[in-house]
Structures are given as structure tokens and as C-alpha cells.
Image (cartoon, rainbow, N blue to C red):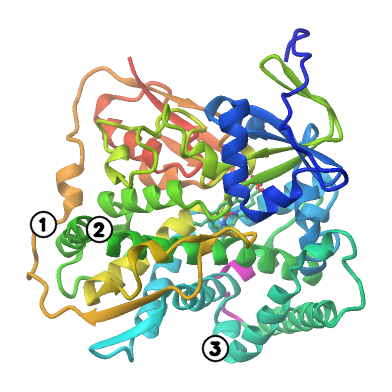
Amino acid sequence: NTVSAHKEPPKMPGAWPLLGHMLEFGKNPFAYMTKLRNSLGEIGEFRMFHQKMVLLTGPEANEAFFRAPDAQLDQSQAYKIMTPIFGKGVVFDAPPHKKDQQLKMLMPVLRDKPMRGYAQVIVQEVEQMIADWGETGEIDLLEFMKELTIYTSSHCLLGDEFRYELNEEFAKIYHDLEKGVNPLAFVFPYLPLPVFRRRDKARARLQALVTGIIAKRAQKAEKSEDAFQMLIDAQYDDGSRLTPHEITGMLIGTIFAGHHTTAGTAAWTLLELARRPEYMHAVLAELDAQFGVDGEVTFQALREIPLLENVIKEVLRLHPPLIFLIRKVMQDFHFKDYTVKAGKYVCASPRVSHRIAEVFPEPEKFDPDRYSDTRQEDAKPFSWIAFGGGKHKCSGNAFAMLQLKAIFSILLRRYTFELIDAADNYQDDFTQMVVQPVSPCRVRYLKRVAIEESAGESLRNDSQETAHAGPGFRIIIDRELCQGHATCMAEAPELFKVDAAGNLTVLQENPPLDLLAKARQAEKYCPSKAIKIDLN
Ligand code: HEM
């Protein structure tokens, strides 16, 4: 941000009149962005029609992108297409101060405490999905994961009424809302097309149902504990409440944000494991050791499954469902010697940034060991960005990881999986906004005959650091990154307090070393990566 930052970003050659680079970008955005990075480096400009887009890649450029304030880089333009579905005045369509408060009201829903209840619900849904599977069969893995994750997220977020009493009607509403996501909505969101009409009817019906449930719940003595209830009870700074219109939009927005992203990641995790028997066996051994044959899959037990976690992380590195994130430049944006003028757009690309050899050596290789304590290839801030970063980092990231771990803790202990088609046939589909494996994505399941009974003690016990007494250590908080998930408070209540509004207080500035193990857990599990532990 200095006066010397004056150069225009270098430009990609070969722009067509009117179209710019749209044809090549549209054909395969990942291939095009990789080409841009290879020819221009960490900052480079291309054109989508008349619109100038600047792609930023690599940890340093990512950091500049994610740390920029909203007033400089604005997210809402990129989500305009969703306004008819989420609703006018809801989150990205709301004025900034209102948007911030609404996003903040969503945080308690995705915080550590309700997560314990969600774990049970997710486990129950997975069990139900496979209850009639029998010995062997074939499934379209992506379809299976999409169905499963819509049940898990609607059950956790919308609650029992939608999951049980209104299940079929909700499925139809959701279908019509999904079909209404159409690039045309960027330009003509309310064109009188049948898909848009069905979308608007579905949105109105959902709001009527939500309004009905709010009224019914108000009559009941005992309170529900789902996300829906938390939004009913939430308040703006001035004490006013969310309207049914806003609650409907926030719930549907949260379900949309988490549905295809989680389903695609779940499908890819199983595909990558099925391609690599050595990792499949190692993950199975880990799960068997953690849960045994009939071990209950609880929130606590799901917290630490290091190999499965690293496998999922590696899947998200190679197949991040969101391959580029967009912001509109509202005030000139500076990066190193370059200035991006207001009016242009800037993008970050998790997919391209994750395949830079200087950051992740042999980037094409599937190697979950990259994240081991000895290698820590993702240690550099803003190098691994599947969930974004900074203030707008995915607030559902802990929920997504919990879901993924719970799904595999059940599925893999009950069944083994084989690919039906040649391994190379399973590819990413770049034609969709959320990138997932190409459909159909067929796999065969076979019941696992015997699991080595209680293959060992819980891995958690082995991996816990032993407590030391002696001089202390320092806790450093990056306030810009903290989103108030309160995971730290669950891990180390002696050290951290997060109030209802999400504000963090560190209770001991220089704690004794016997709290180091707990503090390290808090550092490791902070969904926003806002905690650093510094040994004196
Ligand atoms: C934002 C990825 C699952 C809720 C984001 C962003 C990314 C992302 C990259 C940042 C977007 C940007 O900077 O423009 C993912 C991935 C997921 C996942 C890869 C699964 C593997 C979920 C789930 C939920 C969720 C399960 C909710 C239940 C949100 C919300 C935001 C967000 C509310 C907006 C945060 C804000 O702007 O403050 N997600 N997400 N996501 N995600 Fe996720």
C-alpha cells in the first residue's frame, strides 16, 4: 500500500472483441487460470466480456485478498445471482452494517456447542441412509452424498419439523430453488421464465412454512435447540429481531453454502481412498482403533482422527469445490508494485494456489502426509485456502469437517468400496459453479465381513502431549481472523472465554506450561486459524 504501487497488472494476450477471454475461461476455468499463473505469475489480468478480472494466486497475494476490508473489496456483487433465493435485504443483498450483523447471528449456529448435538443427528442420518443396503450393490456416489448431506444439513439447521413432518414438501421446494440458480439471474433475475416462477413460488411457500413453525414454537413450553431456533431468538444491535423473511433467507443460504460443497468433498474423499488401497487400509485401521466394532460415534470421538483429517484436507487441496472467489474492487487495491483500479474484479483461486510446487512440492501427488507435524506444508498462512480466509472464511468449516468425519466413521466401518469405471474416468466437472466429480460417479459397496475387534486403544490417548510444569508460554490472537467459533473455549476453558456475541477474551496471558497441551489443541482446532502459541 505504498505510493510506489502504481503498475497495472500484466495482461493476458488473446482477448477477443466483446468476449474477451470468455470462451477459453468458460471451457475450463481451472486450465485457464493455471495458464494465467504460469505465464504472468501471482497477479494477472484477463477479461470476461468487457469486465476486467485480476487473478491473484499464491500465499502472499491470497493474504492481500482475504485481509482487504469489505469497503475495498466487496463480496456482494458475486452473490447477486442468489438474491431471489436468499431474499432481498438478506446477507449479501443487505447494507453492510446489516449484512455484518446477520453473518454474526449465524455464528452461534455454527459454533462449538451446538456442534455436539449435530454429531448425533449426522450419525443417525448416515445410519438411516444405509439401513437397507444389504450385502452389496451399486450407487451413484455423488447422488448418494447429495441426498445424505441435504438430510444432515436440513435436520441440523432447520430442525425436526422440516425433517419429519415436511420432508417431502421441503425436497420439492429445495429442488425448485436449486433449479432457479441460473447465470441469467445476474442480468435478469426476475425474467418471467418457468424456472424463475417456480423458484419464487418455492421461496414464498418456504417462508409461509417458516412463519407457521415460528408461531407454533411460540406456543410450546420447551424450546428447540436447532439453528432455526437460534435465529428466531437472535437480535440486532438495536434489539430488533430477524423477520421470517430474513430467517428463511439465512437458513436457505446456509444450506446452499454447505450442501454441494460438502457432498462433492465427501464423494471425492471416497473416490481418492478407493483409488489408493494403502490409504484406505490405514484410514480403516485408524477408525477401527478409534471406534472398535460397535463403538459409538460421538462428537468427542470425532474430534481427533488425524489420518482421516489429513486425507480430507488433501482432498480439499486437490479438489476444492469453490475454485475461484470473486470480489468487486470498490477502492483501488494495491499488491506489491501493482494497483488494481476500482471497478475491476479480483479473484483468488483455491484450486490454482493449491497446486504451486514451491508451496506444495509435487503438487499433483495425493499425499496426506504433507500435513503431518514434521512436514506441515500448509503452515504458511493463506497457502491452503479451500475454506477461504480472513473475515469471510467459511463459517461452516468446522461443521463441514464434522459431517465428513462422521460420514466416513460410519460408512467405512460398515462397507468397503470399489470403483466401477476406470480410475481415470472420475474427474472434476468444471462446468458447475460448485465443482464436484462428473456424474455418473459409480461405485460398488460390499459389506465388511469382520472388523478386527477393538484393534487398539483410542489414538487420542497416544497423541496427547504430556503436561509439563514450569515457566509459561504466550497466546497470540489474530483479531482480524477470529470469528468467534468458541472452539478454543471448549478445548481450554482455563485459557479462553467467548461471550454470546462471539468476543474472545484470553484469560491468562502467560499461562503455566501444564496448560500447553490444551492450548495447542485450541490452536490446532481453531476454525479461523486465529491462535498462535509462542513458547517463551
Ligand atoms: C463461505 C468453502 C461448507 C457456510 C465459504 C467460503 C469458502 C467456503 C471458500 C468463502 C467464500 C468467499 O470468500 O467468497 C466451503 C467448503 C465447504 C463448505 C469447501 C465444504 C467442504 C460449508 C457449510 C456451511 C458453510 C457446511 C454451513 C453449514 C458458509 C458461510 C459462508 C461460507 C455462511 C460465508 C461466510 C462469510 O462471508 O462471512 N465457504 N464451505 N460452508 N460458507 Fe462454506
Mark sitting earlier along the chain (3/2) = 3
Residue found 57% across the figure and 46% down from its top: 31
**Of the image marks 1 and 3, the number of the one nearer the N terminus:** 3
Assess whether residue 501 is covered by the magenta stretch: no
Please determine whether, in this image, residue 238 is positioned above or below residue 60.
below
Determine whether the residue tagged by mark 2 lies in a helix, strand or loop: loop
Residue 224: within the magenta?
Answer: yes
Amino acid at pointer 1: Glu
**Residue matched to label 2:** 276
Mark 3 neighbour class, 10 Å CA radius: few under 14, some 14 to 19, many 20 or more: few
Q: Quadrant of residue 27?
A: bottom right
Q: Is mark 2 within 8 Å of ligand 1?
A: no
Q: Nearer the viewer, residue 124 or 424?
A: 424
Which of 391/239 is in front?
391
> Dot 1 lies on which element?
loop
Q: Which residue is mark 1?
A: 457
Would residue 230 be seen by someone viewing this image from the given angle?
no
Q: CA distance from mark 1 to mark 3?
A: 38 Å
Q: Secondary structure at mark 3?
A: helix
Mark 2 surroundings within 10 Å by alpha-carbon count, few (fewer than 14), some (14 through 19), many (20 or more) = few
Q: Judge whether 338 appears above or below 250 on screen.
A: above
